Amino acid sequence: MGKRAIFGGVGVPVLLLAPQLLVVLIFFYWPASQALWQSFLLQDAFGLRTEFVWLENYADLFKQPDYYKAMRNTAVFAVAVTVLSLSIALYLATQADKSIRGAGVYKTLLIWPYAVAPAVAGVLWLFMFQPSLGIVARGLRALGIDWNPLLNGNHAMTLCILAATWKQISYNFLFFLAGLQAIPRSVLEAAAIDGASPLRRFWTVTFPLLSPTAFFLLVVNIVYVFFDTFGIIDAVTQGGPSKATETLVYKVYHDGKLGADLGSSAAQSVILMAIVVALTALQFRYIDRRVNY
């Protein structure tokens, strides 16, 4: 039996928990409460006076067609980035888990993009796909594709999806690889002895045992798409062209920082937080049932 630490009072546990609780209070609950309070206020044009308007900011927000467009953009962006980043990372992890020469080098190279900041990742992809100078854009024009994310909204959204996916693959790859290495080899060998093909072994043995990791990454990737991709969109398209790539998180910044409409921006941030909490709860409510722990 391992050693256990027993505290005679509540003083030491409180001291150990206090720093983390203080960080959560200062950097989460306090800003969230300020955003909620700000969403009920309306500021004058000069920022000298505020008026309590109850739910007027929320009512005005749902009357804006641009807000529903941002919701659609976010839904498309979230589904595409989540599906692509998880599937590609899972495929790379299964290949890296094999006994091949130079596997350590491959794993190191696949992990590197995780260290790149989102804004830097966006700029890198923007350079490659820049209509007049980008090396990939030149190749697309040689194939007869008139690539121009500066004018074409679908091209701009595709570019943002590619940049966000590339940035997140490394994170997913790390967890998938760790999950694969934790699966007992005896289980896979037993399935192989029973005559199961590699594909059948993956779907009937490997993936069910990997489902807790996949579920965790699904939740994390949804949060990543809704919040952490702001830097990519700001660096690549700034929500354009014609707001074709304006997601909910970028609209919060655009209306609050650039438009100086703090009440509407705060209301959007509250709605965005509620959407992410609801999606996370739904995932735990329905998808968690199919996870094999």
Image: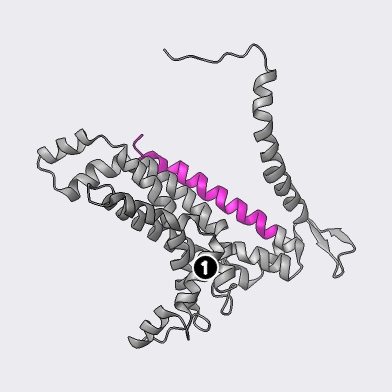
- Region of the chain picked out in magenta, as a range: 267-293
Q: Which of 142 and 10 is in front in this view?
A: 142
Mark 1 crowdedness (10 Å alpha carbons): few <14, some 14-19, many ≥20:
many
Q: In the figure, is residue 179 to the left or right of 263?
A: left
Camera sees residue 246: no
Camera sees residue 61: yes
Main SS category, magenta section: helix
Q: Position of residue 262 (x, y in %)?
A: 76, 62
**Residue 84: which quarter of the image?**
bottom left
**Residue 20: which quarter of the image?**
top right
Query: Residue sitting at 36 percent across and 40 percent down?
Result: 291
Q: In the figure, is residue 234 to the left or right of 135?
A: right
Q: In the figure, is residue 27 to the left or right of 131?
A: right
Q: How many labels does the image show?
A: 1
Look at label 1 and name its amino acid: Gly
Query: Residue sitting at 44 percent across and 44 percent down?
Result: 216
Q: Position of residue 169 (x, y in %)?
A: 41, 56
Q: Which color mode does the image show?
A: one colour
According to the image, label 1 marks what residue?
A: 122
Secondary structure state at the residue bearing disc 1? helix
Q: Nearer the viewer, residue 169 or 261?
A: 169
Q: Does the magenta stretch include residue 273?
A: yes
For the N terminus, the quadrant is: top left
Relative to 180, say whether 172 is above or below: below
Q: Position of residue 61 (x, y in %)?
A: 68, 65
Query: Residue sitting at 78 percent across and 56 percent down?
Result: 54
Relative to 13, say whether 24 is above or below: below
Q: In the figure, is residue 25 to the left or right of 47?
A: left
Q: Which of 219 and 112 is in front in this view?
A: 112
